[in-house]
Amino acid sequence: MTLIKKHRVRTKKSLIDTLPEMLVSALANHEDFVVTCETDAETKKKSLYVMTGDLITPDMLATFKQQIERKKEEGNTIITRDWK
């Protein structure tokens, strides 16, 4: 008798469909939502990272704000809104 393996069919969602769901979930759970891009030095391939969870400490946030402020002339942007 042969054992038949059943594989679950995966429906691959596009990034455009996944990002709003992740953002809404992070906001509802009072979690951090971080999006960053990395370019591989050798292959020049770009990778996008989207992360949610308790990621950013108050010290890290202060450092990020300072870095963004110093590099505003280069096009860095930060948007801040009071949480209610």
Image: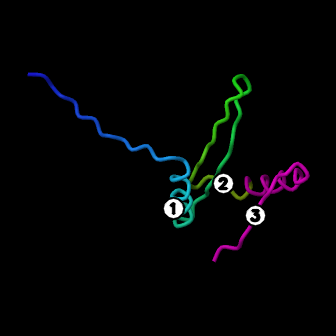
Amino acid type of the residue tagged 1 in the rendering: Ser
**Which mark sits nearer the N-terminus, 3 or 1?**
1
Label 1 sits on residue: 25
* Residue placed under numbered mark 2 in the picture: 56
Residue 28 in the image: state x and y as whole percent.
Answer: 52, 67
The disc, 1 or 2, on the residue closer to the chain's N-terminal end is 1
Which corner quadrant of the image does residue 39 belong to?
top right
> How many C-alpha atoms fall within 10 Å of the one at disc 1: few (<14), some, or many (≥20)?
some
Does label 3 or label 2 sit earlier along the sequence? 2
Span of residues in magenta: 60-84
Q: Which residue is identified by label 3?
A: 79
* Point 55% across, 51% down: residue: 16
Q: Residue at x 13, y 22 (%)?
A: 2
x%, y% of residue 49? 61, 43
**Front: mark 1 or 2:** 1
Return the x and y of residue 56 as percentages of the image width and height: 66, 54
Badges 3 and 2: C-beta atoms under 8 Å apart?
no
